[in-house]
């Protein structure tokens, strides 16, 4: 038995993707149904499975929504008064986080996005 | 009218707090009710207001839970097989994110925590 013959039992790397997206048209930021559909579409595009959700609409129309995924979670917070959306994806397993963020950024009509990826749960 | 007499209309800084917590006793990681109570208590301790939530228990007992806050969201994902919990708090406004994480870390009985804080939505 050689080392290379051992199965790879390391858990999939865990990553946190964050995106701040600035838009020029705030109407999408107060459209709960479109934001919900956008998150579902992006999660599916990235290979994630949606198993739960919670959404809230604030008095000014701002929306907070979270999808619980079999691979962790995907959330959005919109700030129409700041022409801004924050998106966070914690992923474990084979989720294409860059694609998830790209789908959301495009569908928001973002002029500018700041996307970051952090390794999580790195053993000591 | 001097500059210092102008009201401070800058929005509160937006921050993402992340914590990975390793425990020695996995029983808390499969206790949905305790995890839910823990998140509520930590959010309240940090000055946040809970306005929605979603929880899911996986077949192996692992729990994913998200609280929607008036100040954004607080989530937890547990991995009993890895003796690990991931906690994420996106905060806008006067939420004491360090305290939120400290409350959760203590109540999980964490042996080791890795807490980080990222500025979000920094204008170009």
Image (cartoon, coloured by chain):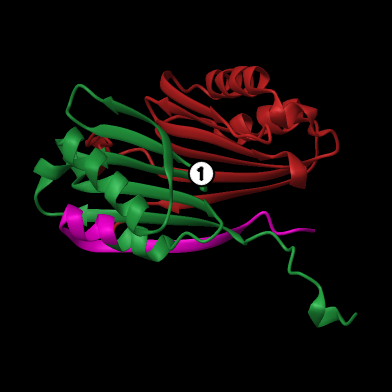
Chain colours: A red, B green
Q: Residues within 10 Å of mark 1 (few under 14, many from 20)?
A: some
Q: What residue lies at 64% left-to-right and 24% top-to-bottom?
A: A35
Q: Is residue A51 above or below residue B17?
A: above
* Whether residue A37 is visible: yes
Image check: B19 left or right of B68? Answer: left
Q: Any magenta on residue B108? A: yes
Q: Nearer the viewer, residue B48 or B108?
A: B48
Q: Position of residue A57 (x, y in %)?
A: 59, 29
Q: Position of residue B22 (x, y in %)?
A: 22, 55
Q: What residue lies at 61% left-to-right and 36% top-to-bottom?
A: A98
- What residue range appears in magenta? B103-124
Q: Position of residue B99 (x, y in %)?
A: 35, 64
Q: Any magenta on residue A117? A: no
Q: Nearer the viewer, residue B5 or B72?
A: B5
Give the secondary structure at mark 1.
Answer: loop
Chain of the residue displaying label 1: B
For mark 1, what is the residue?
B70
Q: Is residue A120 above or below residue B37?
A: below
């Amino acid at each position: 038995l050689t080392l290379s013959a051992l199965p790879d039992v390391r858990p999939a790397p865990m990553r946190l993707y964050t995106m701040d997206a600035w838009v020029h048209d705030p109407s999408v930021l107060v459209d709960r149904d479109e934001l919900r559909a956008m998150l579902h579409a992006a999660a599916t595009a990235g290979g994630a499975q949606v198993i739960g959700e919670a959404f809230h609409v604030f008095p000014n129309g701002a929306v907070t929504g979270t999808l619980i995924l079999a691979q962790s979670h995907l959330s959005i917070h919109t700030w129409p008064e700041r022409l801004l959306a924050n998106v966070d994806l914690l992923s474990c397993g084979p989720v294409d986080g860059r694609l998830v963020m790209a789908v959301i950024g495009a569908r928001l009509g973002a002029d500018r996005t700041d996307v970051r990826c952090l390794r999580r749960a790195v053993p000591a």
